[in-house]
Image: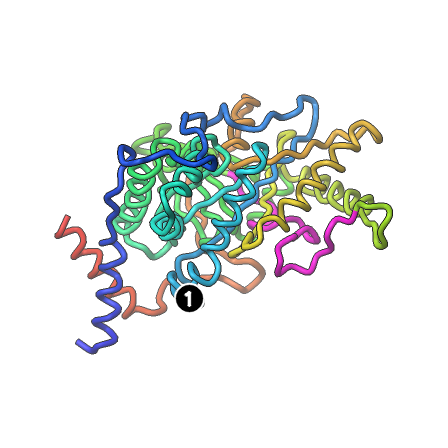
Amino acid sequence: MAPLQMTLLKLCVCIFALVTTRTMSERKTRGWKAMPVEETCGYASCNPIKEGMVNVHLVPHSHDDLGWLITADQYYYRQVQYIIDSVVQELAGDPSKRFNFVEVGMFARWFREQDEEKRDLARGLINQGRLEFSQSGWVTNDEAVTHYNADIDHQTYGFEFMRNNVGPCGRARAGWQIDPFGHSREQYGFDALFFGRLDYQDKAKRVKTKTMEFVWRGSPNNLRQKADIFTGALYNDYGPPAGFCFDIFCSDPEIVDDPRLHDVNVNERVDAFLAAVQDQAKAYATSHLIMPMGSDYQYQAAHNWYKNLDKLIKYVNLRQETNGSCVNLLYSTPSCYAYQLYLTNRTWSTKEDDFFPYAHRAHTFWTGYFTSRPTLKFYIRNANTFLQVTE
């Protein structure tokens, strides 16, 4: 076997061989930065909504693939470690703030590098429901060409890391498959599932009929209702409304609200955001809307995002008193949003088949990866076989 091929094979095996030994019993609480460890996560930890309003659930998040244009380790050291550092600091300073994280493989790298004081801080934020993990898998997995064994293994490994190092609050209540190119109906035991990519014709129809959210029947002929999962397709893929990206690499205008300064734009920014809310509301069936506020490898300087989101929440909600607006913004998470939809007690449409193939515009189907890179896929399948044997 060629050296490069052997290296790839070893890499595939080693990805699954990383094992952490620290348990909850080894925790030590010291220092003023440590957060309370009481398990107040879950739906009781959600920020309150306002009845009779259109409640817009702002979900700060960062999509951090374990490898894309560079390796997972390179992404971690160049970007993701700063994302988690920055987000943890912001959340610790404000109980109302929330953040949604997914890729346990990245969080594990960060967690292993921290001292016990910083680990306790992260555990406390997770236990309070302020740092929420959706999916809780080692990665955000592709759903089209992976073998189900690899899918199960990566999800199990992510769950086990969170269980051993964080506790029950590290278990995901919602799935967050925002970037795969098509979706399979065979999912996990979540309370809800959200994804970003939807075939353009399917999306147009669902927007028109207000069926962007539905009950997906994963096994209609066998498991039946046991396999049903509430599912939502996100309106702007997985990013914010156009013009409202506040990351350090974005060029959208910040919210300027000091009347003593030039370029004050707070009113026009609020008007533009309310227009985006009105546009999205036409596609959804309830008075609750979910808006992801983030994108790929964002929040390296989380204060930029949160400072502008704080202003957006303040001035949009102020319109309730000054203009009679019925729009209410709040920091939220995918599971908190799903919980509010559950409380509406409405009947949803259903779907039984998969979301394949995916096309984002006419004559542009994302199907090439079904047959591309066969050698790499061969090594991955063989590595997964070795893993099953050793287990």
Image: 364 above or below 147: below
Image: 132 above or below 303: above
Q: Residue at x 69, y 38 (%)?
A: 282
**Figure colour scheme:** rainbow
> Which residue lies most toward the bottom here?
2
Q: Report x, y in % for residue 187.
A: 37, 41
Q: Could you say which quadrant of the image residue 25 lies in?
A: top left
The foreground one among 136 and 343 is: 136
Q: Residue at x 31, y 31 (%)?
A: 223
Q: Is residue 241 magenta?
A: yes
> Which residue lies most toward the left here?
389
Magenta stretch in the rendered image: 232-256
Q: Could you say which quadrant of the image residue 51 lies in?
A: top right
Disc 1 residue crowd, few under 14, some 14–19, many 20+, Cα 10 Å: few
Q: Report x, y in % for residue 142.
A: 39, 54
Q: Residue at x 36, y 42 (%)?
A: 116
Q: Provide the major secondary structure of the magenta segment.
A: loop
Where, quadrant-wise, is the N terminus in this rendering? bottom left
Is residue 341 visible to the viewer in this orientation of the structure?
Answer: no
Q: Report x, y in % for residue 158.
A: 32, 44
The disc labelled 1 sits on which kind of residue?
Gly
Residue 207 left/right relative to 266? left
Q: Is residue 307 magenta?
A: no
